[in-house]
Amino acid sequence: MSKKTTYRPKYHVSIASGWCNDPNGLIWHEGKGHLFFQHYPYEPRWGTMHWAHVATKDFVKWEVYPVALVPDEPYEVICGCCSGSAIIKDGKFTLVYTAAQPDQQRQCIAESTDGGVTFEKVPDNPVLKAADLSWEVSNRDFRDPRVFEKDGWIYCIAGTRILEKDRPFVWDGVRLPQVDGKNPAILVHHWDTGAVAEAPFNDAFEGSGSGSPSAYMVSGRFSPSSVHHIAHSPSEVPVVGGSQDDFGWGNLILFRTKDLRNWEYIGKLLHRQPNIAEPFYNLNGVYECPEYIDFGEKEVVLSSPQQLPMIGHEYENVNSVLYFAGKLNFETGQFYVDEIVELDAGFDFYAPQCMTTPDGRKIMIAWKEMWDRNYPTRPEGWAGTYSIPRELTWHDGHLYQWPVRELEGYRGKKVTVGETVLGKDVFFPEGFEGDVVDISCEIDPQDAVRTGVLVFAGEKHQTRIYYDQQMQSVIFDRSCGGLGLVGQEQNVQTRICDIKPEETLRLRILLDVSSCEVFINGGRYTITGNVYPDAEDNGIGFFTEGGNAKLLSAEMYELVID
């Protein structure tokens, strides 16, 4: 077997060189869909963030624009121009983004008057700090502003930690030790004013009034496990640090403005209610990269919670993606939750954001990687890809995802298979092969324990996507897929997606060199993963285990990307 000369996909957005992560600023403007994204241009690793920019007319072919934001201001030192969104305001193409530093995160804007080719940061930056909103909003964790217009206001949802006013002071779980029998002097930050001062331990934390625990937070050292946006900042940088009790719990907040300069804080989205289990309140991280979608009959908020504990087979990644379905109260900020659902059950899917097209479609794109993993494309000088743009719809009480319809315009050669009984031998239909293809099939599981599809199959490697009838789950197994993958999760080789059983299993699978996206039963469920096979691993087959199944139909299109 020979290693592929490149793992770069053909029809998925990827970075040409360097690093990329969260998609930002998705917006349709002047006949094009614009996609910005987090970018470090100098090495294929996380670094001081820039905003890269591409645009498209059909969501398949993308035009590269100049880098939109470069971290060249003092308030962007160390971490850079981090995630945010875009809006057209007073005829100006405007970006709203987080200027992140290890000890504080503030919101800034940049404007374009040439249709989004170049952007200038406004002199008023930073236009919004956590201290401008409420004492309960963490200065250290306040990021990823998602702006949208509604009823004459510009609203914004951002991720943060909500602080408890009467929280006890602790330092990494213990009180600060005495030095030579005396309490040490420490650096404190005032919650309301942002003032920084050195104070004796007793004066700052055992006194009253302006020195009370509710007024101050203590400085410490950066912890690499805290915030992905600053995960590779120098460890010697003095920043706010300490325990979860000091920093509060992950939440989302709502605020509004008329002019992007003067902001009114409304409140936090997540409150205790019957449809939210305890782990969603006590999140040891931030609900990153929020997105708001109004489907009319239902409002949906997407978000990417850090370190959400695994619940059943869901949220197996250290950092996950979910959606809250319900109703948002724009007067209080409270979101009344009907249900919480993992958005994608796969390995490589994070920070999705949406745009609305002129025909009303909601188009979503996500970062098709995951934090704290190895990235096999690094030797090629790049790291980072994005999901196929997906059309989102709400029907039958669920959020559905489906590949953007424009992809069908790039279909080439078609191969079909009629009804076939699947037994103990893998069935490789004639002509079913390739690694840049669009596959659809329908399978009746009958009495098989497992039945499904092999992709990227060769002599040594194969990726298995199958239905386990006993578990009532679809499993994506890349354990024999090719290059090894490692990460913080206990298992980075298989993912399990529990589904509601139907009479047949309907799969649509998009392959693109090193990418595999699975859409199950019309897009009610999805599983996304990257796989790194050898050059010859192009086989596609159908299999069963523990009984027989019936392949009712299958078709495959080669995708031709000029």
Image (cartoon, rainbow, N blue to C red):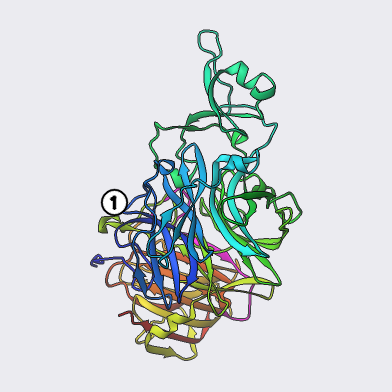
In the rendered image, the residue lying farthest to the bottom is 418
Picture residue at 56% right of the left edge, 65% below the top: 497
User: Range of the magenta residues?
Assistant: 485-505
> Is 312 placed left or right of 66 in the picture?
right
Camera-nearest residue between 230 and 448: 230
Eyeballing the image, is 404 above or below 171?
below
Q: Amino acid at mark 1?
A: Tyr
Camera-nearest residue between 537 and 256: 256
Residue matched to label 1? 42
Label 1 SS: loop
Picture residue at 71% right of the left edge, 72% below the top: 297
The mark total stands at 1
> In the picture, residue 4 is in which quadrant?
bottom left
Eyeballing the image, is 552 above or below 36?
below
Eyeballing the image, is 122 above or below 434?
above
Eyeballing the image, is 62 above or below 302?
below
Crowd band around label 1 with a 10 angstrom C-alpha radius: few (<14), some (14–19), many (20+): some
Picture residue at 66% right of the left edge, 24% below the top: 210
* The stretch drawn in magenta includes residue 500: yes
- Dominant secondary structure of the magenta stretch? loop
